[in-house]
Amino acid sequence: MTTKAQKLRDLINSGEHFIAADVYSAITGKIVEHVGFQAAYLGGHACSAFHYAMPDYGVYSQVEQLEQANRIAEAMEIPLIADADTLGETVADAFHFTRRYVKSDVAGYHVEDGINPRHSTFVGDLQPIAEMQAKLDACVKARGDSPFVIIARCDELYPKSYRGAGDCSMETAIQRGLAYAEAGADVMLYPFANQEACDALRAALPIPVCVLGPVVPGTAFALHTGWGWMGAAQLHLKNARELMETGSVTGFDPTMPEKAEFLEMGLYDDLIRDWAKKTGKPFRD
């Protein structure tokens, strides 16, 4: 049987662009699979915000991310890519958590070169290249012969003015990409890379390039996050305010015909009906 990691690797190797769509729970995983996406993506901000009400500053751990990621991955047949943040602070952390990811149902992750607490009021720099190479080397060793996909995320093009840590140097972005590829990364991820930057990166690097956010033509794939979990939170806030102010919620359809499919209600109804018939208990059709 083809593993989900192998499915992801085959998708990347096909050369056809795809979108890994925003998921943050098991049912949202089923939804993106239902509408036809070939892969899904669990962002660190999506997970920390939605499940723990915490910012994505590196304050919640990969133990928590792994727990949610595996729940989502098990609910789908399509592969899930997880945001693994920095995979901890040391090469030992990176090795340990990679082994856990490989044993899970998650197909791949991206590990980044920022320094914690990332994306916060701390204005940090990126990890030294040698440190990131050592971390990626530990990831590759922990993966062994599994097809699990290791994506190296470089934040050089993620500007400090947007809570990033990069100086927006294309020369440095390419230098880091070459170093991370040499250390064994399968794919390079560059947040905030526009079309011009992606074209230059693709020309310079020996491995595929992907982006975080809107699709950039020519890249291998896009990890598209934010609209799902934030949309759900915004809708919940709107409906909660309406309920508090008026005593009811309008515009809400409680039927949702796809719900039975997403929850496999038919499967469980059949199991329960067969049990009731065989044991002489009452049942409904």
Image: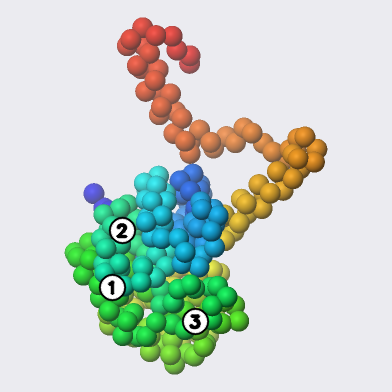
**What residue is pinned by disc 1?**
91
* Residues tagged 3 and 2 counted as in contact (Cβ below 8 A): no
Judge whether residue 134 can be spotted in this image: yes
Badge 1 local density, few (<14 within 10 Å), some, or many (20+)? Answer: some
In this picture, residue 242 sits left or right of residue 206: right
Badge 3 local density, few (<14 within 10 Å), some, or many (20+)? Answer: some
Residue at figure coordinates x 43%, y 23% from the top left? 269
The one of 280 and 101 positioned closer to us in this rendering: 101
Return the mark for residue 124: 3
Q: How is the image coloured?
A: rainbow
Residue at figure coordinates x 39%, y 82% from the top left? 127
Q: CA distance from mark 3 to mark 2?
A: 27 Å
- SS under mark 1: helix
Q: Nearer the viewer, mark 3 or mark 2?
A: 3
The one of 111 and 8 positioned closer to us in this rendering: 111
- SS under mark 2: helix
Q: CA distance from mark 1 to mark 3?
A: 20 Å
Residue 267 in picture, x, y percent from top left: 40, 29
Residue at figure coordinates x 54%, y 68% from the top left? 213
Return the mark for residue 101: 2
In this picture, residue 100 sits left or right of residue 163: left
Q: Tag 1: residue type?
A: Val
